[in-house]
Amino acid sequence: MFPPPSPWRQVGAVDPDKHYVGFTSRFHLGSVRDLPGFVAASRRIAKQVRTSPGLVGWSLAADLPKLEFHTLSAWEDEESLQTFLSTAPHSETMQRYGGRLRRTSIFVQFPVSGRELPLTWPDAVSRQIASSQ
């Protein structure tokens, strides 16, 4: 990935015995013309995620030459994740760019224990590949 993924940002303490909800996604912008607006929207979403109730940790990645973007996060529960996904600016950005993607997006939700945190990019990419086959 270019540039390299952002470091894992953990929010608060993690209980090694607790079960959390992991989430990873991959999507491809349809055109380089969408890149400036999408990057600006991504900054607003990054601010949103940092303040989202139930967030445990997160990281973002991109392969800019391929217009490919990845997310990786862990949440207290599915409700926290769904609330984030359905709240602006995330929801508005997905509506705006969802019809402009050039490949089918990948969204993978999975159980994860506190012992498995922080989540890693090799694991996320493996889960993305497995879900698309």
Image (spheres, rainbow, N blue to C red):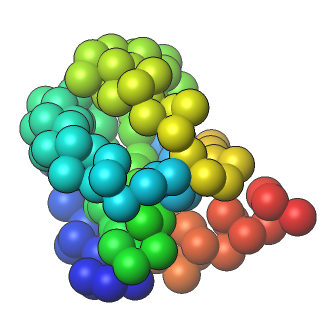
The foreground one among 74 and 98 is 98
At horizontal 54% and vertical 81% (from top left) the residue drawn is 122
Spot occupied by residue 5 in the image (x, y as percentages of width and height) = 30, 75
Residue 109 picture quarter: top right
Spot occupied by residue 34 in the image (x, y as percentages of width and height) = 33, 48
At horizontal 42% and vertical 66% (from top left) the residue drawn is 67
Q: Which quadrant does the N terminus fall into?
A: bottom left
Residue 127 picture quarter: bottom right
At horizontal 66% and vertical 54% (from top left) the residue drawn is 103
Q: Which quadrant does the C terminus fall into?
A: bottom right
Spot occupied by residue 44 in the image (x, y as percentages of width and height) = 14, 36
Q: With 72 as the anchor, is 101 left or right in this view?
A: right
At horizontal 36% and vertical 60% (from top left) the residue drawn is 32
Residue 53 picture quarter: top left
The foreground one among 54 and 124 is 124
Res. 110 in view: no
Res. 34 in view: yes
Spot occupied by residue 45 in the image (x, y as percentages of width and height) = 22, 36
Q: Is residue 77 above or below residue 122?
A: above
Q: How many marks?
A: 0
